[in-house]
Image: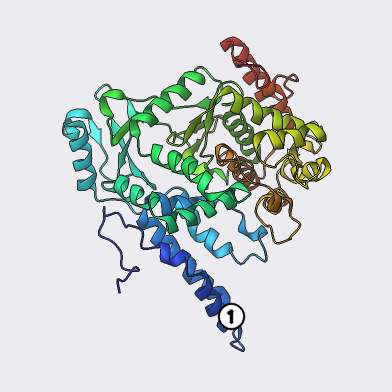
Amino acid sequence: MADTNRPLPRGRVRRTMPVAGFTARAAGGRVVAALREKAGDTGAVARFHDRTAERYAELLGHSKGVLMKAGQIVSMVDTAAVGGGELTPYQKALTRLQADAPPMDPALARSVFEADLGRPVKAVFADFTAEPMAAASIGQVHRAVMPDGRQVAVKIQYPGVAEAICDDLSNTELLATVFRFAAGAAGAMPDIERAAHEISERISEELDYRREAANINAFSALYRDHPFIRVPEVVPEASGDRVLTMTYMDGLDWAAAQHADQELKDTWAEVITRFVTGSYRHSNLFHADPHPGNYRFRADGSVAFLDFGCVKVLSELQRSRIVRLVRAAVEGRRNNLRESMVETGFITADSSLTADDVYRWWEGIIYELLAPQPATYTQQASKRTIESLIDMRSPDHPVRRMSVPPDQVFFSRLNLSMNAIFTALHATFYARAALDDMDGVAAPVSELGRRHEAWVRQRGLPHGMDDQ
C-alpha cells in the first residue's frame, strides 16, 4: 500500500489519494470511541484530533487543486461554534492553507514561465525573486521588477495542476466530498447533481489565467479612482496561459492585520463590505471568493484585493433577485421575503416553511444589520451565523427544508465568510447603512460611506435597487 504520509518531491502535484482520509470518518469515530474508554487519560481524544488535523493539513497542502480549496473553505469556519468544538483542531491546522502551501522548486517555476512566454525570465524582468512570496492551491506568486521599474507580482501555475483538477472533477467520490464541504460553508445541502456544474465551472475557471486577467481588468475598470478599494493592473506583456503578472500591491497580510489598531480594523471591515457586496450593486460582477488571504490591508484604511480567479458575471435577473431578497429581509417584509425565497429557488411555493419561519431564520443571519448601529461583530455573530447555516443538529432546523439553487451556491458563502472575517477583526461599523446607501435607499452616514457615494455619483454608476 502506498505511504500517503511520505512528502512529495517539490513541484509534484499529488492526485486524489487523500480522499481516503475524508471517507474514513467511521473508522476515525471508532478510534475516538476507543480512546474515550481509556481510563485516566482525559487528553487522549484531544491529542488524537491534533495529530489527525496536522496530517490532513499536510495532505491537503500537497494535493493542491480541489482538495486544498476544500481545506481553505473549512479553515474559514469558526468550528468552536459547531457542536462541542470537536472540529477546532482541524480549523486551526487548516488555517495556514489560507495563505501558504508547499511551494514548487524555483527551477521548475522558471521552466513553467519560460515555456509559457517563450522567453527567459531575465528577458522579461529587470529582477525576479526565485523564492515565492506565497504559494496557494493552483499556483504560487513571485516578486519581480519590470524594466521600467514597476514592482509586480508574478503568479505561476503549478505544472500538472490543470490535469489534476480535471481528474478531481471527474472523480465522483471526491467531488461529492468537496461539494459537501462547500455546501456546509454555503449553509444548506444543494442537490449535488444540480450544483456540480456550477461549482465545477467556477473551479475550472480559476485555471484559466487569461480569464482571470480579463476579470482583473473588469474590476480595475469598475473601481477606477475609488477612494479606498484597490485592484491591481494586469501586465499583458508578462502574462500568458499559465503566467499572470500584475502590479504589486503592498500591505499587511491577514495574520498581521488582526493585530492592528481597532479603529483601522473597523475601517477595513467596512471597505471589505463595500467591495464584496458593492460589486454586484454598482455592476454585475460577483467576487465569489471572499477570502482574507487574498487581501492586503493598508495603514491608510484602504484594502487591496488580489485574486480574481473565482468571479461570476451575473445576469440582471440574478443580480436583482439577490438584492431584492436581502432588502425584503432587512426591511422585515416577511411575505415578500418568502416570495423571494420561492422565486430564487430556496423553497417551493408549497413549502411548510411559513413567512414567519423564513424571517426568523434570516434574523440569525443578518443579526448585525438589524441591531442598533454601529454594530459590533463578536464571537456571538459567528456563532449565530453558523447555527443558522451549518449546525443543523435539530431535526426542525429550517435549512433541512431548503435547497441551495445552483446559481446561488457561491452567494451563500458570503454571510459565513464575511462574518468570520469581521468577527476575527472584532469590527464595529455601520453595516446596515453601508447596505442602504449602496442600494440607493438612504444617504450614507459614515465618512467612508460619504466618500463611496461621492465616487458612485462621480462615475455615474447605478445603485443596487436601480434597474441595470
Asked whether, in this view, residue 322 is left or right of residue 75, the answer is right
Residue at the extreme bottom: 39
Q: Residues within 10 Å of mark 1 (few under 14, many from 20)?
A: few
In percent of width and height, residue 100 lies at 41, 50
Determine which residue is flagged by label 1: 33
| Residue 156 location, quadrant | top left
In percent of width and height, residue 85 lies at 64, 64
Q: For the residue labelled by badge 1, is the local secondary structure a helix, a strand or a loop?
A: helix
Relative to the observer, which residue lies in front, 323 or 138? 323
The residue under label 1 is which amino acid type?
Ala
- Quadrant where the C terminus sits is top right
Classify 238 as above or below 380: above
| Residue 350 location, quadrant | top right
Relative to the observer, which residue lies in front, 440 or 19? 19
Q: Is residue 361 visible?
A: yes
Asked whether, in this view, residue 241 is left or right of residue 335, the answer is left
- Quadrant where the N terminus sits is bottom left
In percent of width and height, residue 251 lies at 47, 36
In percent of width and height, residue 163 lies at 29, 47
Classify 29 as above or below 288: below
